[in-house]
C-alpha cells in the first residue's frame, strides 16, 4: 500500500512557516516513498474561509514547488459527512445536546470548584423522549456530541513515540453545531478515511485531537492512519510571532527568499541533520525519515535565511533563473555575477554596471594617471582570451604596482565599486571598447565627465 499524506490548511489566512513546514514534511514523506501528497482545504467554517485565501494557498504551494497530486474541499463534501453522521447516530455514537454556552460555562465552573476536571457531564444522554420533544416544540435545535468510549487510547507516534490517553478523562466533543455546520474533528476523520490517507502529519497542538479521532476512525470502521505530530516552531527568542517575525510567505517572498532556501531550512529544522542549500527541492527528498524529526521545539531564525539564500542562488543554473533576470543578461553574465548576489534582484544592479557603466568615479591624480596608462594598454592587448590577466600583467610590468594598488583603481574605474564579481569574468562582458572608454574617462576626470 503506497503512502498517502495530506496537507489540510484552513483557508482563513496566508501560509506561514509553521504550516509550510507541515506541508513540506507531507510532501517529502510522499516523494520519498513514491506515494501521493494531497491538498485538503478545510473550509467548513464559511464565515472565516475565503476564496481569496484558497487561491493564495494554491499559488503559494505552486511557488514553493510543493505540487499536490490532488485536491479536495471540505465545503463540497457535505453529503459524505451526512452519511457518516447518520451511521454514527444510528450506532448511538453521536447524541443531541441542548446546553447553551452559558450553561456549559457554569457546569465547568462548578466542576472546577469541586476539584474535578471540567468534563461534559453527559446530562443530554439522560434526556427523555418527552424532553427532546419539548425542545423541538420550543424550536431549540440540538448540537451534537461524539460519545467517547471510556477506554485507554494508544498509538505509536512517528515523531513522539508511544502516546497514551484515557477515554474516560476526555470530554465528549461537539462535532456539529445547532445550525448543522461541522466542527473540525469529524469531517477530518471522514476525509482521511475516504481519501485513503496513510500518514497524518500535523503540529503537536493536535495530539489530544488524535486521541478523540482514533475513536472516530474505529466507530466508522475506517483503517487507522499513522500519525506524526511535529514539534512546534519557535522564534529566535521564544514563541514565533506572526506579527514580529517575518514568517508569512508573502513577506519572505518580498524579501527575495527563494523557495528552495525556505524549504531547505525548514526541512532540517528540529532535526540533527545539517542545513544544506539545494538547487532543486527534489534534492531534499533522499534520506527523509520521520525519525529525524525531534520532539523538542524547533527554532526558526529568519536571519539564517539570508545567508542560505545567497548559497542557494550560487547553485542555481542560468536556465532556472533566466526569466527573472534582465532580458539581455546571458548565461555568461549570470555565471559572472551569481557569486555576488544575495537576492536575485541584486543581479540587475550588477548587470546595469556591466552594460551601462558606473556613475562617474573620482580618483586621486596618481590613480588617474595609472588609469590613463591602463586605457592605453587595454587598447594594445589581445582581447580574445583572458583580457584581465593580460591587462594586469602588462600594467604590473609597466608600473611595478601589484595587489590592491594594481587592482582597486581598475575595479573602481570599470565598475564604480570597490568590491564585486571577479574582474576576470566581468571584463569580457564589459567588452573592449567600453573598458577602454571607462579607463580613459577615469584617467581624465576627477568625476566631472561620465564614462561611457
Ligand atoms: N485544518 C486543520 C488545521 O489547520 C487541519 C489539522 C489536520 O491536519 O488534521 O489545523
Image (cartoon, grey):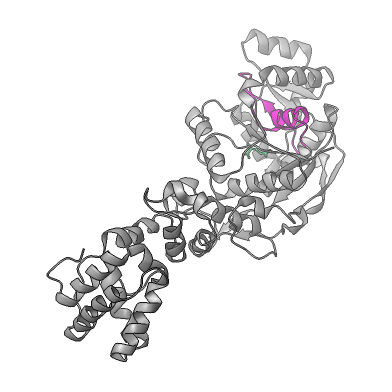
Q: Nearer the viewer, residue 438 or 155?
A: 438
- Decide: is 202 above or below 58: below
Q: Residue at x 23, y 79 (%)?
A: 371
Q: Position of residue 160 (x, y in %)?
A: 77, 54
The quadrant where ligand 1 appears is top right
Q: Nearer the viewer, residue 190 or 197?
A: 197
Q: Is residue 176 magenta?
A: yes
Q: Nearer the viewer, residue 420 or 8?
A: 420
**In the rendered view, does 233 fall on the left or right side of 331?**
right
Q: Which residues are magenta?
A: 170-197
**In the rendered view, does 264 fall on the left or right side of 122?**
left
Q: Residue furthest bottom?
A: 400
Q: Residue at x 42, y 68 (%)?
A: 425
Q: Position of residue 225 (x, y in %)?
A: 80, 39
**In the rendered view, does 137 fall on the left or right side of 159?**
left
Q: Is residue 110 magenta?
A: no
Amino acid at each position: 500500500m503506497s503512502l498517502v499524506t495530506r496537507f489540510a490548511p484552513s483557508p482563513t489566512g496566508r501560509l506561514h512557516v509553521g504550516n509550510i513546514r507541515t506541508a513540506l514534511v507531507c510532501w517529502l514523506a510522499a516523494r520519498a516513498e513514491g506515494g501521493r501528497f494531497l491538498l485538503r482545504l478545510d473550509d467548513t467554517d464559511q464565515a472565516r474561509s475565503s476564496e481569496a485565501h484558497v487561491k493564495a494557498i494554491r499559488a503559494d504551494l505552486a511557488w514553493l514547488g510543493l505540487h499536490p497530486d490532488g485536491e479536495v474541499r471540505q465545503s463540497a463534501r457535505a453529503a459524505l459527512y451526512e452519511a457518516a453522521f447518520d451511521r454514527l447516530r444510528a450506532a448511538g455514537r453521536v447524541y443531541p445536546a441542548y446546553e447553551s454556552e452559558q450553561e456549559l460555562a457554569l457546569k465547568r465552573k462548578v466542576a472546577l470548584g469541586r476539584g474535578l476536571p471540567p468534563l461534559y457531564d453527559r446530562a443530554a444522554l439522560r434526556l427523555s423522549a418527552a424532553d427532546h420533544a419539548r425542545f423541538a416544540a420550543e424550536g431549540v435545535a440540538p448540537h451534537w456530541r461524539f460519545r467517547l468510549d471510556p477506554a485507554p487510547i494508544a498509538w505509536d507516534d512517528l515523531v513522539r513515540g508511544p502516546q497514551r490517553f484515557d477515554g474516560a478523562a476526555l470530554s465528549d466533543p461537539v462535532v456539529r453545531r445547532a445550525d448543522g455546520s461541522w466542527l473540525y474533528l469529524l469531517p477530518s476523520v471522514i476525509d482521511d478515511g475516504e481519501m485513503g490517507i496513510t500518514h497524518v502529519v500535523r503540529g503537536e497542538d493536535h495530539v489530544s485531537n488524535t486521541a478523540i479521532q482514533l475513536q472516530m476512525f474505529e466507530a466508522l470502521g475506517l483503517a487507522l492512519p499513522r500519525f506524526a505530530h511535529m514539534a512546534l516552531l519557535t522564534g529566535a527568542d521564544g514563541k514565533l510571532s506572526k506579527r514580529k517575525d517575518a514568517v508569512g510567505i508573502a513577506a519572505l517572498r518580498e524579501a527575495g527568499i527563494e523557495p528552495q532556501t525556505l524549504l531547505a531550512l525548514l526541512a532540517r529544522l528540529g532535526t540533527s541533520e545539517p542545513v544544506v542549500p539545494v538547487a532543486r527541492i527534489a534534492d531534499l527528498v533522499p534520506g527523509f525519515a520521520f525519525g529525524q524529526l525531534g520532539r523538542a521545539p524547533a527554532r526558526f531564525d529568519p536571519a539564517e535565511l539570508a545567508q542560505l539564500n545567497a548559497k542557494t542562488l550560487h547553485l542555481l543554473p542560468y536556465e532556472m533563473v533566466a526569466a527573472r533576470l534582465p532580458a539581455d543578461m546571458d548565461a555568461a553574465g549570470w555565471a559572472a555575477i551569481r557569486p555576488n548576489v544575495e537576492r536575485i534582484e541584486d543581479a540587475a544592479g550588477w548587470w546595469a554596471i556591466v552594460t551601462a557603466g558606473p556613475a562617474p568615479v573620482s580618483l586621486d591624480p596618481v590613480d588617474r594617471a595609472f588609469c590613463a596608462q591602463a586605457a592605453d594598454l587595454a587598447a594594445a592587448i589581445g582581447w580574445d582570451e583572458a583580457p584581465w590577466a593580460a591587462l594586469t600583467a602588462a600594467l604590473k610590468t609597466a608600473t611595478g604596482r601589484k595587489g590592491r594598488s594594481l587592482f582597486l583603481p581598475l575595479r573602481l574605474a570599470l565598475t564604480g565599486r570597490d568590491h564585486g564579481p571577479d574582474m576576470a569574468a566581468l571584463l569580457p562582458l564589459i567588452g573592449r571598447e567600453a573598458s577602454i572608454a571607462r579607463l580613459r574617462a577615469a584617467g581624465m576626470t576627477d568625476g566631472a565627465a561620465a564614462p561611457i
